[in-house]
Amino acid sequence: MTRRSGSCLRVAALAAGFLVGTLGGPGDAHAQSKTGTTVGTFLMIEPDARISGMGNAGVALDFGLDAVYYNPAAAGSLKQTALAFSHSEWIAGINYNHVTTAVPLGSAGVLLGSVTALTSGDIDVRTVDFPLGTGERYNVTDFALKLGYARAITDRFSVGGRVAYVQERIWNSSTSMGVLDLGTLYRLTDQGMQLGASFSNVGTGSQYDGTDLRITYDQDPDINGDNGTLPAILFTDHFGVPVLFRMGVSMPVKLNARNLLRFAVDGFHPSDNDESISLGSEYTYKDMFALRAGWQNLFLKDAEVGLTLGAGVRGEMNNSFGYHFDYAYADHGRLDQTHRITVGVDF
């Protein structure tokens, strides 16, 4: 190992130590977690199989379109149009689909766009009187449309941002809102060590409305002869959105001309939970085959997630366009496991 690479590794270790020291064990400083107090939490499901296999430690990775979800600035240096589709069989049979694209504009930057859809399928309506079902069925549908822009300010520093329209629907009631993503990515060394930071889902939140909240009301049930079917509306609370601040470092380690290792560590500060750390690694052979492993949400109290694994293959077709296929497995403890696939092309 050269003196320069050894120095880079020491800097990476110091940066990782800073993240662990500042975010790794603050759970006792908070009286209680705010888990379950926000709306639009499907926005926290990470779509990309490549980085999901690396423990979702992606804020400091320059993986282009693959990393845009974690940090919009990752697309700032893209030179080719890219398109990717991701699918996940989520917890409890929920289907999650995500399509994202990036279109370079030369020196003017890169346009970004994505569509996310989550569907629950039909669910039986159950009540205290009918615990086996009333015969009615409902479903949950979540949708997000994001448009953004990224640009490389210098050969080392990139910025990016996205705005989104988000809708969440439960049976005949829904809520909608706008959110904002912002990110920066900075290459610290010539060897490729990078520092990244991003804010996701910055917004004001919303409350539900719809026909399911229209009811009839008896103002005084003890009085006979009055109107017991007064039209009324149930008002829900105003729910915030799950704002998330990420900060991390990544470091490639070139073993030889064919073999490359990459390590990443991210720190998370969410608005609706406690802080945590995620770790990720990737081994690639000839930039064609990859194996990945990671660990999500270290130090998070009562975390159900943990080990992640993944693999991928990439190549070119007739020297006209590139392709990649990635798979990721994630352990969710008592909630079982999830699987993701991502298929992408660049041209």
Image (cartoon, helix red, strand yellow):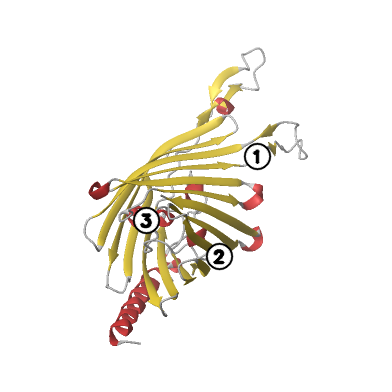
Q: What is the x, y in percent for residue 333?
A: 63, 63
Q: Amino acid at mark 1?
A: Gly
Foreground label between 3 and 2:
2
Task: Kindly identify the residue that appears in the image at 32 percent across and 82 percent down.
Answer: 5
The CA span between labels 3 and 2 is: 20 Å
Residue 266 placement: quadrant: bottom left
Q: Residues within 10 Å of mark 1 (few under 14, many from 20)?
A: few
The CA span between labels 1 and 2 is: 27 Å
- The label shown at residue 166 is none
Foreground label between 1 and 2:
2
Q: What is the x, y in percent for residue 263?
A: 43, 72
Say above or below: 88 vs 193: above
Going from N to C along the chain, the mark reached first, 3 or 1, is 3
In-image side of 68 versus 143 (left or right): left
Q: Residues within 10 Å of mark 2 (few under 14, many from 20)?
A: many
In-image side of 186 versus 60 (left or right): left
**Which residue is disc 2 drawn over?**
310
Query: Which of the two residues, 157 or 35, is positioned nearer the viewer here?
Result: 157
**Which residue is disc 3 drawn over?**
71
Residue 3 placement: quadrant: bottom left
**Which residue is disc 1 drawn over?**
121
Q: What is the x, y in percent for residue 69?
A: 42, 53
